[in-house]
Image (cartoon, rainbow, N blue to C red):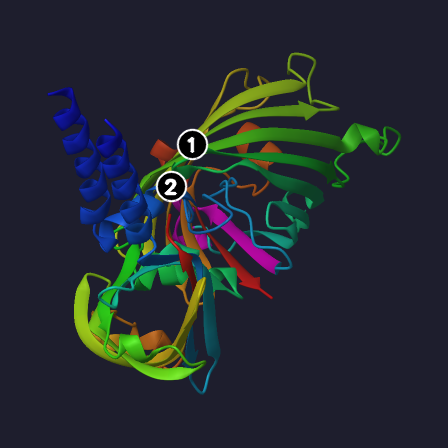
């Protein structure tokens, strides 16, 4: 009896190997692959802030961002369009995972430099990982001469630093979310009651409504906001439109600045009272 | 008892021989090329997965769309996100048969493969002329064919209609080794 079992078993083994058809062999082989999740967001900016995305090695990008005045400033100012606040930026991808950049904002005549590094990528398949993490670090220098002539601040006094961990998850091809814990350090603050260190929690997401258009939202909640100004949390809503070579972003936000320390900590507009700035980001990659 | 061992041994040997009937590659090369007056677009995939049953001449190819590499990363993103929709249709699959399989002993014999190509949720019967030959431990098959983009329901927006060819040339080269 034992013998028969062994023989049957041996034959069974033999046939099981044989009956496996070509397609199922290949299915097994593909199941063993790991795929990196791409296009969590359409571009390197969510709205005001950065997304986890970086450009591929060697891409040089020229970025122009605009924020007009407040919509509720009336028809006399053409609902804010008379005033304009602009930032020029140059970004260069040293590697697929590392971007360095330099920019100049008209807001407080600020220069900024930053680097962005993709630490972890979301993956599916064999070695899957549920989310992506990018580090963002920047330094800015305010050069506006808004001080008394005999009280000129030193270079160091004018500096502000920002560090962010951008953590994003792409739920499916249409839906992505980002969480952006942020730490900002001011070397100098306006009043003694203001804290030099501000922590902020950023939340954002995008939803694709067609292959080339997505709706984005972004909100930064400050844990210890400035007391010397009427500080508000930054809120942005917008749409991303992909036009062949680049992404065009239309934005409404209560923030005027386009650099982290500005829009996260120095926003004074109340979105729900109509202190809304219309703006756009447009980039050209070379 | 001896008989039993002999029997098992024989069966094992047979199964060894049988598994030698299948040849596989995991690094098949597939590229496609689109030429237009505006720009040339080329993408390459070095992770083509294919298997041949040498007994029947049957052949199956599987390609992950996300493994296609483009020179411009933005093109690659648009390919996956907008055109081929890799999240919904991750693979291209070809299932077919090498018609005159038994004549492939000489180097660079001409052969023909007939089968069905599945791309972007659509399927199409195609016939491909290939160069093929087999030496003891390796089978090499290479060739090219043309694919009409419209056959696979891939919509190209009017704004870039001049950038992408209506007919795309696909080239491939597969080096198969015995499947164990």
Residue lying at 38% horizontally and 41% vertically, measured from the top left: A32
Which image quadrant for residue B132? Answer: bottom left
In the image, B4 versus A24, the foreground residue is: B4
Question: What residue is shown with label 1?
Answer: A129
Circle 2: element type: loop
In the image, A2 versus A65, the foreground residue is: A2
Residue lying at 62% horizontally and 55% vertically, measured from the top left: A57
Report the magenta residues as a range: A61-79
Comparing labels 1 and 2, the label whose residue is closer to the camera? 2
Q: In the image, A188: left or right of B57?
A: right
Instruction: Classify 10 Å Cα crowding around label 2: few (below 14), some (14-19), many (20 and above).
Output: few
Instruction: Classify 10 Å Cα crowding around label 1: few (below 14), some (14-19), many (20 and above).
Output: some
In the image, A92 versus A203, the foreground residue is: A92
**Looking at the picture, how far across and down is residue B44, in whole percent?**
47, 66
Residue B171 visible from this viewpoint: no
Residue A281 visible from this viewpoint: yes
Question: What residue is shown with label 2?
Answer: A32
Residue lying at 15% horizontally and 20% vertically, measured from the top left: A2
Residue lying at 41% horizontally and 53% vertically, measured from the top left: A250
């Amino acid at each position: 009896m034992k013998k028969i079992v062994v023989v049957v078993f041996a034959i069974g083994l033999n046939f099981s190997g044989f009956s496996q058809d070509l397609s199922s062999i290949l299915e097994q082989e593909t199941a063993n692959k790991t795929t990196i999740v791409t296009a969590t967001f359409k571009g390197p900016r969510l709205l005001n802030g950065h997304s986890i995305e970086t450009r591929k090695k060697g891409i040089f990008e020229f970025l122009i961002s605009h924020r007009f005045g407040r919509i509720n400033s009336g028809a006399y100012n053409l609902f804010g369009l008379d005033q304009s606040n602009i930032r020029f930026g140059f970004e260069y991808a040293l590697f697929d995972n590392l971007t360095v950049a330099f920019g100049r904002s008209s807001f407080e005549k600020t220069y900024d430099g930053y680097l962005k590094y993709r630490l972890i990528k979301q993956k599916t398949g064999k070695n899957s990982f549920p989310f992506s993490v990018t580090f963002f670090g920047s330094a800015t220098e305010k050069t506006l001469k808004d001080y008394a002539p005999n009280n000129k601040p030193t270079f160091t006094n004018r500096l502000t630093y920002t560090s962010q961990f951008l953590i994003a998850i792409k739920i499916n091809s249409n839906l992505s979310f980002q969480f952006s814990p942020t730490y900002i350090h001011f070397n100098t603050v306006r009043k003694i009651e203001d804290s030099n260190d501000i922590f902020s929690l950023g939340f954002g997401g995008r939803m694709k409504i067609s292959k080339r258009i997505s709706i984005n939202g972004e909100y930064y909640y400050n844990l210890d906001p400035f007391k010397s100004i009427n500080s508000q949390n930054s809120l942005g809503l917008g749409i991303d439109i992909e036009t062949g070579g680049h992404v065009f972003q239309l934005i409404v936000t209560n923030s005027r600045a386009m650099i982290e320390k500005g829009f996260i900590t120095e926003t004074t507009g109340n979105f729900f009272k109509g202190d809304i700035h219309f703006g756009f980001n447009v980039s050209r990659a070379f | 008892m001896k008989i039993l061992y002999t029997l098992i041994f024989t069966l094992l040997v047979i199964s060894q021989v049988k598994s030698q009937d299948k040849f596989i590659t995991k690094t098949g090369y597939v590229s496609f090329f689109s030429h237009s007056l505006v720009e040339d677009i080329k993408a390459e995939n070095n992770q083509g997965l294919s298997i041949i049953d040498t007994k029947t001449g049957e052949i199956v190819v599987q390609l992950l769309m996300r493994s296609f590499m483009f020179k411009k990363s933005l093109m690659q993103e648009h390919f996956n996100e907008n055109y081929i929709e890799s999240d919904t249709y991750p693979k291209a699959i070809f299932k077919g048969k090498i018609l005159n399989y038994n004549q492939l002993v000489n180097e660079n014999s001409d052969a023909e493969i007939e089968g069905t190509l599945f791309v972007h949720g659509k399927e199409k019967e195609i016939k491909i002329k290939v160069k093929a030959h087999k030496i003891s431990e390796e089978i090499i098959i290479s060739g090219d064919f043309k694919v009409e983009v419209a056959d696979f329901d891939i919509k190209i927006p009017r704004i870039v209609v001049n950038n992408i060819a209506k007919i795309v040339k696909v080239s491939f080269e597969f080096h198969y080794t015995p499947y164990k």
